[in-house]
Image (spheres, rainbow, N blue to C red):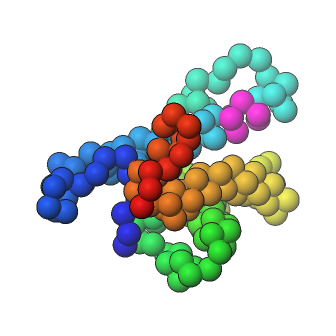
Amino acid sequence: MPNDANQTAEPPRGGARTIKHRLLDEFRRFVLLFLYLWVIFGMFVLNERIILGQQGINYVAQGFALVNALVLAKVMLVAEDLNLGRWLDRRPLIYRIVHDALLITVLFVLFHVLEKVIIGTIHGATVAASVPLIGGGGIAGLLCVSTILFIALIPRFGFWAVSRALGPGQMRQLLFARGGRPSPG
């Protein structure tokens, strides 16, 4: 698999990546995904509170958003490392972006359901009683939440795909260098 184009540090001289470098790179990728997902999930919680007309911050729900972001960031890293969309590498980037956002949306919904079922069965509930009502329940609620999550993931996968296409360090150069120009070659 090609290097993650969000990579900011160049591999050590000689082209060999040390274990330390790989661990630091993986940790950095994880932290960025975690923060992105925590913001998304935290916004879901705040949105729910606004819709329900509740006041104050629900710290328990925000805690679940934090834990879900940690777990699902790792799921996202594993899915990226599996490179399930590699068959789209010769197609326009938009195909890869949409594919990856859709794949991760489905994985997130499945992991959310699995998490609730495991927690429910640990507390003595049946599997059927443990299945969560996503978006208020029913197919409409599931589609609504899935669509919002899918759309929220598109910028992340768009950034990743463009960064990967530009090459290591080029997106960083575009965003943070004076004049915003990538380095030649």
Whether residue 132 is visible here, answered yes or no, is no
- The residue positioned 17% from the left and 48% from the top of the image is 20
Using residue 24 as the reference point, say whether residue 165 is left or right of it: right
Observer-nearest of 87 and 53: 87
- The residue positioned 51% from the left and 56% from the top of the image is 163
Using residue 90 as the reference point, say whether residue 138 is left or right of it: right
73 in the magenta segment? no
Q: Residue furthest front?
A: 184
Q: Horizontal and vertical percent for residue 84?
A: 49, 75
Whether residue 88 is visible here, answered yes or no, is yes
Observer-nearest of 86 and 91: 91
Q: Horizontal and vertical percent for residue 39?
A: 60, 36
- Quadrant assignment for the C terminus: bottom left
Q: Is residue 21 above or below residue 42?
A: below
Q: Horizontal and vertical percent for residue 48?
A: 76, 35
Q: Horizontal and vertical percent for residue 146?
A: 72, 57
- The quarter of the picture where residue 31 lies is top left
Main secondary structure along the magenta-highlighted residues: helix
- The residue positioned 81% from the left and 28% from the top of the image is 50
- The region drawn magenta spans 43-48
Observer-nearest of 135 and 19: 19
Q: Is residue 113 above or below residue 82?
A: above
Using residue 20 as the reference point, say whether residue 47 is left or right of it: right
Observer-nearest of 49 and 121: 49
- Quadrant assignment for the N terminus: bottom left
- The residue positioned 71% from the left and 16% from the top of the image is 56
Q: Is residue 95 above or below residue 163?
A: below
Using residue 74 as the reference point, say whether residue 17 is left or right of it: left
